[in-house]
């Protein structure tokens, strides 16, 4: 993973999103609605909702906006039902891309995702065509500047909480968990006051693809930008070794 800073990528995404906070809040608002419908409005009894609230706070969503979203989802039986859909495909140079969306219209979302791939000369594949190249893991990023603990103390706290792995990077610490342990580990670290720059279950590439052609780099960025601008799209994972983000 040398030279591939997870925190740099997150900061890059956050900077882009700061110019479009409405998009970020829309995404998280849908996740809150889904979590409430699946497990109820009480975070104490709904681990999925707790995780979404943590994600919302990391994105600087105001507490009253979070509370309104929970109350709306809990009190509106006729609110929109969102479905989770996943698309897999290929970008330029054999890069692998996974798109996760929450939608109330699968036909619209499928058409938009297909259009995004075609804009960058990529193509949608079948379910499972690239997901085997990724590992699903819980990932917690701690900004060194925000954390008072030294690396050894934080590592012991993370491992004691049930984490699988701990890595130190130039600007951050990366704590990895099994997907099923993520909520518990995150909660234990949060209870200790450990600040988190990002915390979510994600798809981590097993290997990264380097693109040498400027045309390929432009095309994959075009795909990612189109997907980023789609309100239905929640997360996009890819294995492009993007050296411009570090």
Image (cartoon, rainbow, N blue to C red):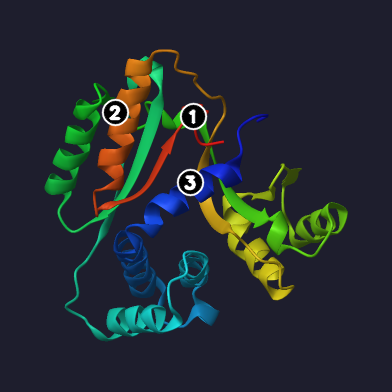
Q: Which residue is mark 1?
A: 242
Residue depicted at 28% across the width and 42% down the height: 227
Q: CA distance from mark 2 to mark 3?
A: 30 Å
Element carrying mark 1: loop
Report the quarter where the C terminus lies. Answer: top right
Count the marks: 3
Res 231 quadrant in image: bottom left
Whether residue 175 sits left or right of residue 214 in the image: it is right
Image disc number at residue 47 = none
Where residue 209 appears, as percent x and y from the top left, is 49, 20
Viewer-nearest of labels 2 and 1?
1
Sequence order check, earlier mark of 1 and 3: 3
Classify residue 152 as left or right of residue 240. Answer: right
Q: Which residue is the extreme one toward the right? A: 152
Mark 3 element type: helix
**SS of the residue at dot 2?**
loop
Task: Tell me what residue is drawn at x 46 percent, y 71 percent.
Answer: 49
Residue located 29% across and 78% down the image: 73
User: Residue 215 or 153: which is nearer the viewer?
Assistant: 215
Going from N to C along the chain, the mark reached first, 2 or 3, is 3
**Cβ–Cβ under 8 Å for marks 2 and 3:** no
Residue 113, picture quadrant: top left
Label 1 neighbour load within 10 Å: few <14, some 14-19, many 20+: some
Whole-angstrom CA distance, mark 2 to mark 1, is 25 Å
Q: Which residue is mark 3?
A: 12
Residue 90 appears anywhere in the view:
no
Location of mark 2 (residue):
126
């Amino acid at each position: 993973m040398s030279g591939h800073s997870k925190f740099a990528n997150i900061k890059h995404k956050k900077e882009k999103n700061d110019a479009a906070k409405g998009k970020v809040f829309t995404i998280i608002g849908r996740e809150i609605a889904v979590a409430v419908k699946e497990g109820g409005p009480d975070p104490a009894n709904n681990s999925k909702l707790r995780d979404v609230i943590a994600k919302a706070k990391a994105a600087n969503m105001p507490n009253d906006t979070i509370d309104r979203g929970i109350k709306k989802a809990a009190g509106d039986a006729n609110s929109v039902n969102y479905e989770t859909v996943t698309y897999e495909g290929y970008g330029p140079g054999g890069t692998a891309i996974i798109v996760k969306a929450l939608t109330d219209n699968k036909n619209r979302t499928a058409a938009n995702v297909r259009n995004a791939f075609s804009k960058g000369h990529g193509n949608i594949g079948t379910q499972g065509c690239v997901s085997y190249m990724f590992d699903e893991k819980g990932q917690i990023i701690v900004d060194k500047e925000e954390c008072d603990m030294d690396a050894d103390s934080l590592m012991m706290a993370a491992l004691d909480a049930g984490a699988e792995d701990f890595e130190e990077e130039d600007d951050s610490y990366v704590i990895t968990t099994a997907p099923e342990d993520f909520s518990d580990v995150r909660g234990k670290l949060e209870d200790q006051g450990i600040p988190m720059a990002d915390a979510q279950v994600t798809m981590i590439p097993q290997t990264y693809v380097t693109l040498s052609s400027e045309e390929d780099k432009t095309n994959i960025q075009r795909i990612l930008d189109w997907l980023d601008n789609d309100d239905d799209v929640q997360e996009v994972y890819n294995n492009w070794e993007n050296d411009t983000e570090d």
